[in-house]
Image (spheres, rainbow, N blue to C red):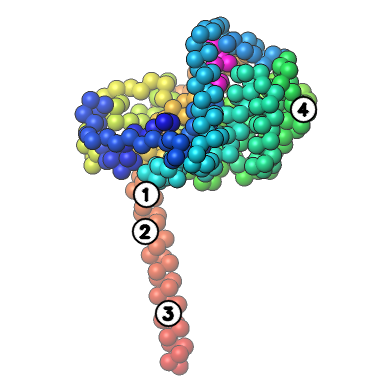
Amino acid sequence: MGPRLVNETDVDDAYWGGDLNIPSFRPSYQINDTNPGTDAAAGASAAFSACASLYSNRSFGGPYSLPASLQNSSYAEKLLTHAQQLYTFAVNATGGQKNYQTSVPEIATSYGSSSYTDELTLAALLLSWATNSTSLYQQAEDYYNMFKLSGQNGVFNWDSKIPGLAVLFAQISQSDSSIGGNFSVWRDEAERYFDRIVNKQGPGYLTRDGLLYYDGDSDDASLNPALNAAMLLTRYAQIASTAAKKASYLNFAQSQVDYVLGKNSMHVPYIVGMHPNSPTNPHSAMATGGNDISELDTSPQNETYTLYGAVVGGPNKFDKFYNIRSDWPETEVALDYNAPLLTLAAMHVVNDTTDPFFTSLEIGAYGKVQPKGGKIAMAMMITIVGLFISSLLAWYLYELNATKVA
C-alpha cells in the first residue's frame, strides 16, 4: 500500500470552517502494486532519503556548511528503510510506472502530475546520496538522459523538480563522496538554466516592479515560482564557475526576496503578521474563524486569528494586490509557498548582516495605493470587452448584409 489522498476535491472545496466540524464521510484513496502512482511513491521516497541524510549528519562539503547537528542513527535508519521500500515500489510495481492520477482520477483536477520522470530521477539521486551508492547515482543519471530532462527552461515548483535536479547532481558530484559524477557537466547544466533566468532569455520575465513571472505557472501564486528560483540560485551560487556568475545569481535572488519583503509598488511584505502593511485577509478558513462559504469576504469582516508567518499567493502580473479573502490566487496560503522563504531566511541569518527590506517600509503606505475593485473590476473589464466585440460583430454582419442587398 502506498501514499494516500484523503477526501475529494469537490467535497473539500465546498467546506469552509474549522477542523473540528469537517463533514463526513471522507473517503481516502490509495496507490498500490496493481494501481500504482510512480510520482507519488518516488516523491515520498525522495523525502525519506533527504531526511535520512539529515539525521545522519551528511554534508555536501566544499563551500557548504555542515547541517544542524540532528544526529540520530536509529531514526535515520528507519527513514532510509522506508525510502528504499518506496523506491522499489515506484520502480517495480506490477501495474507499471504511471502518474498517480491514472490510479486516482479524483485528484486530476486539483493536483494532477504532469510527469513522474522528475520524481523518479530525484528519488534515485537522493537515495544514492543517502546510501553512498554508485549504482543508484548512475541510475539517476540514466533516468535524466532517458527521460530527456536536459535543456528545459520551465518553472521549479511542486509539479516540476527538473531545475533542482541539476543543482543536486552538481552538489553531490563536487562533494567528497565516492559516488562519482562529472561536476563540470552538471555545473554547466545548472548554469545554462540560471543564466537564462538572470539574462531574461527564458520563458520567465520580470514584471514592472521586478518579480520573476511565468505565464500560466505564476497566475495562481505569483510569488512561488520567484521564491523557488531565488532559493535555487542562492543554494547553487556557492559552486558557480566564476565570481561574476556567483554575484549575478545572488543579486537576482536577493531582488526576488526584497520584492516579497516589500520592495514593490504596493509597499506590501507578502507575509502575514510581519508588518502593518502585510496582507490581512489570507484565504484560510482556520484564520478567518468563519463558516459561511457564500460570504467569505464579510463573515467575519475581520479575520479572527493572525496567521503569523504565512506567505500568500501574491500580486497579479501587473504588481497589483487587492487583499481580498476570496481572491485565492492572491491570498491563499500553502506549505510550498513558505518552504523556499524558510530556506532563504535561514541563509540570510547565516550569511548576511543587513536588515530585511520590510524594516524600512512606511507604515500605511499600502493603504495609500491599494487598488480598488479586484475581481469586480476584472469582471467589468471582461464585460466591457465582450460588449465591444459583440458590437463589432453586429456592425460587421449589418454591413455584410447591406452589401449583399445592394
The residue drawn where x is 42% and y is 21% is 309
Q: Separation of disc 3 and disc 1 at Cα?
A: 30 Å
Name the residue nearer the viewer: 291 or 137.
137
Residue hosting label 1: 377
Label 3 crowd (10 A; few <14 / some 14-19 / many >=20): few
Residue 354, placed above or below residue 366? above
Look at the numbered discs 3 and 1 and tell me whether their residues touch, using CB distance below 8 Å.
no
Residues shaded magenta:
47-55
Question: Dominant secondary structure of the magenta stretch?
Answer: helix
Callout 1 crowding tier (Cα within 10 Å): few <14, some 14–19, many ≥20: few
- Which mark sits nearer the N-terminus, 1 or 2? 1
- Residue 178 picture quarter: top right
- Are the two marked residues, 3 and 2, in contact with CB atoms closer than 8 angstroms? no
Amino acid type at image mark 1: Ala
State which quarter of the image contains the N terminus: top left
Percent across and percent down for residue 64 are 67, 15
Q: Which residue is mark 3?
A: 397
Which is nearer the N-term, disc 3 or disc 2? 2
Q: Name the residue type under label 3.
A: Leu
Q: Is residue 49 magenta?
A: yes
Local secondary structure at mark 2:
helix
Q: Secondary structure at mark 3?
A: helix
Residue occupied by mark 4: 182
- Is 354 situated above or below 270? above
Give the x, y percent position of residue 375: 36, 46
Residue that mark 2 sits on? 383
Foreground disc of the pair 1, 4:
4
